[in-house]
Amino acid sequence: MRSIKVDFGDRSYPIHIGSGLLQNIGERCVEAGFPVRSSLLVVSDTEVAPRYLPALEAALQQKGYTVYSHVIPAGEASKSLTVYEEVMTTAIQAGLDRHSAVLALGGGVVGDLAGFVAASYMRGIGFMQIPTTILAHDSSVGGKVAVNHPLAKNMIGAFYQPSMVLYDLNTLLTLPPRQVSSGLAEVVKHGLILDKEFAYWCREHAAELLGLNLEVLGYALERGCSIKADVIRNDEREQGVRAILNLGHTIGHAIEAVGGYGVLLHGEAISIGMAGSALLAAKLGRDKSIYEETVSMLSALSLPVRLPAHYDEDELMEAMMHDKKFKEGKMTFIVPDAIGSVSIVNDVQASLVREVIAQLKKEGSPW
Amino acid sequence: MRSIKVDFGDRSYPIHIGSGLLQNIGERCVEAGFPVRSSLLVVSDTEVAPRYLPALEAALQQKGYTVYSHVIPAGEASKSLTVYEEVMTTAIQAGLDRHSAVLALGGGVVGDLAGFVAASYMRGIGFMQIPTTILAHDSSVGGKVAVNHPLAKNMIGAFYQPSMVLYDLNTLLTLPPRQVSSGLAEVVKHGLILDKEFAYWCREHAAELLGLNLEVLGYALERGCSIKADVIRNDEREQGVRAILNLGHTIGHAIEAVGGYGVLLHGEAISIGMAGSALLAAKLGRDKSIYEETVSMLSALSLPVRLPAHYDEDELMEAMMHDKKFKEGKMTFIVPDAIGSVSIVNDVQASLVREVIAQLKKEGSPW
């Protein structure tokens, strides 16, 4: 088992990564500080619950916990205030008290929704993240929890740290190939931002990662989580440096908003966004090889680097104007300076971004 | 102007109390750290907005702020997830960014709702409390913000400290008499909990308080806020000692839930609850004079100390079982040991509480 400590003073918590960790979920809940006499609420979705929920509940009950569950429809549409209220109703009817905890068993949608429930039920109760996708290595670390508003993604939420992140690698074995690639987009992003060596390591080990070699994948997730933990420990509430984690996300979120959530997977959208950031870097005078290398790494992981032709540039620009990365009306982008190094650039001209989007739709070299 | 500092380290904030403070609201927003280039959202209700909102907006605009407003229907029914989502929609459409702030202009309902919006819009933006009732001296200090769930009050919320509390005493002059008394219930509660001298002072000055003598009222609010600030600074997230502030609230919340929110005002309900706590104290062996004195103080402030006969005991007991003050199924009560001193008593037997409720419905001496 690999373990990382996320350092937030008296709210520090461990990330455990390994195969078969769910078997000892009862002991982990005790380790996380959840009193055995209080009730637990497991939130999961219609894809994950049939596979893992019954065994999870049995293991928790064996340890003495009273367990309730709420299963939401799989997919981004469940990250809504409507579903949030339904989970709250379950929590109240189950009699969860202030010593209870919410366990998020699933991917990013489950983690974000269940996390906001935990953050706001009785003004905050215990919370454990049990990610079952590669993508969720990113969203389960750092305490950003949220639901979507019909007008904008992740607009309603909190910064709320879990008591523990428990990563059972066995749950990744049933992921479909597109979801594997989508998750690896956030993994390699952490290398592109801060760790050149790790970014190249991802390209070298692309075949093993795509083939779900759990030893190789375990290292990749540990490294991805560690880099993220290093960034957020100094900027829990995203006042400054934490913004570098949004590499590719401004364009990526716009792609998701315009195309409809789930048409392109999150990792696919931010892969195109990272290619766009590297294009923007070239327009701002950085070396063109950054773009070539970025595209090579993303392609090796079977990720898209071009925008499908039917996406409308005006709609994408409009969607970006609603994005929360724009302070006081100005456009801010995370721009790579090299592989493994980025800058936060304010005052990016909208016309440049529009050019980037147009070029992302074209085949062949942008030069 | 009277000023109190609420000490929460780097999230400390001032409470300003005085007549005419709204005239300088622009300067206060600058003092609170809200950047002039960002937009502000004023949340108010249909009773308060017509009186104070136009002048408030004009003063803020004169200082250079862009101001939006959202006016909710007056009353507890607005403390819902539905209204919460409507305010969020206004905030998004107005283009509020992460440097924006929400100003709560009104009583406890406005403050609780607007505070939860501020706590969760983009995971937390600036927040100022501008209470316009006496009752709100309590809810505006301490960072407890929430909306109601149909099954239970204040079930969905956060601990979120404002940047400033601005109390313009002139806004209290139009309060109807029942609301004045209701607010004074929370004022005298702070004396009953921790300050014997202040509790007796409230009884002595009852006529001036009920007559809205602003000099006397200003002192009472300063003292009430100070006592509360002292309690919460050591227990922001209500893990322990902060619970003493709930004197009278377990029974009071049940009265509100069973009778319908707003049938009895909040202060009226907790006044009956405080009389009940003093009765419970006598049953647990404390001096009967605590009850006599408590009832005398509350009556002097024109507050009810008896439960109307139509309230059903079973329904009240059931409502209390849903109340969040019950850890792991046991009943916990704040019980007075003397005027100005209370204990947190766990393991109170339900049958004792039932006796108290029955006696609260009877006329004459309970002995």
Image (cartoon, coloured by chain):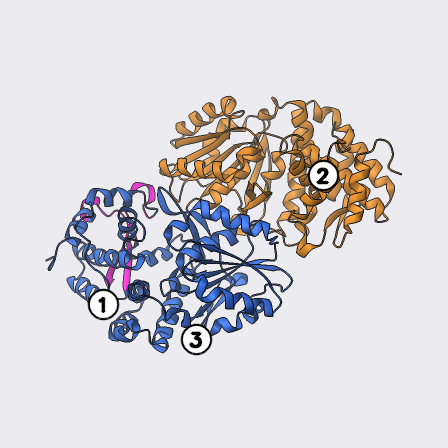
Chain colours: A blue, B orange
Tag 3 near tag 2, CB within 8 Å: no
Say which residue appears at 33% left-offset and 58% top-offset: A244
Residue A281: x and y in percent read 20, 57
Q: Nearer the viewer, mark 3 or mark 1?
A: 3
Q: Earlier in the sequence, mark 3 or mark 1?
A: 3
Label 2 – label 1 distance at C-alpha: 65 Å
Task: Identify the residue under disc 3.
Answer: A19
Residue B295 visible here: yes
The three-letter code of the residue at mark 3 reads: Ser
Residue A263 coordinates in the image, percent (x, y): 28, 53
Judge by depth and name the residue closer to the eye, B72 or B165: B72
Q: Which mark is residue A297?
A: 1
Q: Is residue B338 visible?
A: no
Q: Nearer the viewer, mark 3 or mark 2?
A: 3
Residue at 74%, 24% in the rendered image: B207
Left or right of A90 in this view: A230 = left
Residue nearer the viewer, A112 or B56: A112
Q: Is residue A360 left or right of residue B259?
A: left
Residue at 80% x, 47% y: name it.
Answer: B352
Q: Residue B332: image x %, image y %?
A: 72, 51
* Closer to the eye: label 2 or 1: 1
Residue A204 versus residue A147 in the image, above or below: below
| Disc 3 and disc 2 on one polypeptide chain | no
Quadrant housing residue B273:
top right
Q: Which residue is mark 2?
A: B189
Q: Which residues are magenta?
A: A325-352
The amino acid type, in three-letter code, at marker 2 is Lys
